[in-house]
Amino acid sequence: MSKPIIQIEDLGKRYLLGTAGALDTSFREMLYGMAGRLRGKRDTQTTTRRNELWALRHANFEVQPGEVVGVIGPNGSGKSTLLKILSRITSPTEGRAMIRGRLSSLLEVGTGFHPELTGKENIYLNGSILGMRKREIDAKFDQIVAFSGVEAFLDTPVKRYSSGMYVRLAFAVAAHLDPEILLIDEVLAVGDAAFQQKCLGKMRSVARSGRTVLFVSHNMGTVDSLCNRAILLNQGEIVTCGQTASVIADYMKLFGDGVNNPYRRPTGQPDTSPVTLTEAATVDLQGHLTVNIAANQPFAVRFACRVNELPPGIRLDVHLRDFLGRSVFAHKTELHHHIDAIGSHGLAGEFTVPADFLTKGKYHLQFLVHRLRTKTYEDLVGICGFTVTAGNTAIGRYGGEDFGCVQPPGPLRLEPAKPGELFRQTA
């Protein structure tokens, strides 16, 4: 059997909170350790002063060549940290990660691109970083440009690109320059739906060619359709690793009814967003918290935000998602049109979900604060989890079948067929 293309052994990454930017201070720790050894004792005062956060701890797994592996888990579980270590963007605090192959990654908008260089120049720069010769890049150049759809802007510095253009070109470069390992984070969510499907098709093509894909996503439906194996992370540690369907089932058991419901922003969490979600909950129409909701009962989503500043273009998107992460619907609001709604304690919002709208199942909310096509400030996925129960409805009586996420607004009308009257041909 061939050696694993990715081999992770007791991998860990520690950050020290309270320092500038919460940077890892392993060199400082080394000096502390040396001083302690010289004194022949441990510096307990220093140890107790530090506030440590293990973003990743005791991670062990292997990926074989040609596998497509999904990495799932809630926000802050260590998914992006894992990919940054594999991409050599950050170094581990403990353990090791062995990579046996040429690796390309797309972790966040702009990673690997020089903003002052043009799109064309960045294609050649990225290829050179991957160790490719100019003639190899030349052979792929037209495919990259055609896939990205940014041909008209190739001679424009990428700092002038929208986030969608940036992602299209970055993905095209990462996927076409023959990496043996492709790492993809949730950044594909920036693109439109058509481009996301195009990317998924390309990743399947990459996998069929024998290359390896590691894919981080909150969308369980995408992970289920794309990956033959998955890894579930929570609080920096691997919970389970195995067949995708089994791992997604474990995810739902771990993050099912009432997860983060009500949601309250953790004390001391950094606040760098113009608008910050502070509280959210699902409530009945009398305002009482509810996490188990009958399908034939209406309910509301209420939330509160702290407004630190409100420059033009800041948007708040609230998605209702099913248990696979698929969007059922979304409210999208440009906030500077609602300045009059902001008070001394911030901004409150509410929307109602009518009775007989959702089918039975598990749902959650996503809150996204961003500037359209340029920057994401806050993206909270998987909060305010709740369960819709069927009760004494038609869906309840025909349990066990797949009814989708929403119920049709009216009954199905049946009548005798009338030939030639099914539809009218337009002129």
Image (cartoon, rainbow, N blue to C red):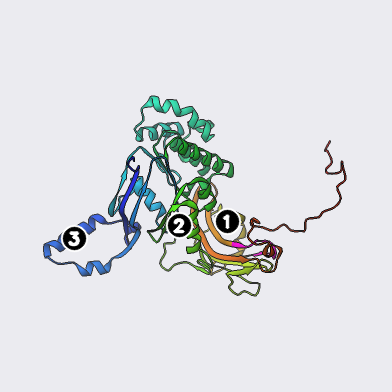
Q: Label 2: which residue?
A: 73
Residue 317, numbered circle? 1
Mark 3 or mark 2: whose residue is earlier in sequence? 3
Which kind of residue does numbered mark 2 sit on? Gly
Which kind of residue does numbered mark 1 sit on? Asp
**On screen, residue 409 above or below 216:** below
Whether pointer 1 and pointer 3 mark residues with C-beta atoms closer than 8 Å, the reply is: no
**On screen, residue 181 above or below 352:** above
Residue 347 appears in the figure? no
Q: Position of residue 199 (x, y in %)?
A: 52, 40
Who is closer to the viewer here, 291 or 108?
A: 291
Mark 1 or mark 3: whose residue is earlier in sequence? 3
Which kind of residue does numbered mark 3 sit on? Gly
Q: Residue furthest front?
A: 1
Real-space CA distance between mark 1 and mark 3, rounded to the nearest whole angstrom? 47 Å
Whether pointer 2 and pointer 1 mark residues with C-beta atoms closer than 8 Å, the reply is: no
Quadrant of the image for the C terminus? top right
Residue at 44% over, 61% down: 271
Highlighted magenta segment, given as a residue range? 352-361
Query: Closer to us: mark 1 or mark 3?
Result: 3
Q: Position of residue 15 (x, y in %)?
A: 32, 58
Name the side, left or right, on which 290 lies relative to 57: right
**On screen, residue 304 above or below 216:** below
Quadrant of the image for the N terminus? top left
Who is closer to the viewer here, 167 or 246?
A: 246
Name the side, left or right, on which 306 lies relative to 131: right
User: In the structure shown, which secondary structural element does the residue marked by tag 3 occupy?
Assistant: helix
Q: Is residue 250 magenta?
A: no
Q: Is residue 357 magenta?
A: yes
Q: Residues within 10 Å of mark 1 (few under 14, many from 20)?
A: some
Q: Position of residue 14 (x, y in %)?
A: 31, 58
Residue at 45% over, 57% down: 73
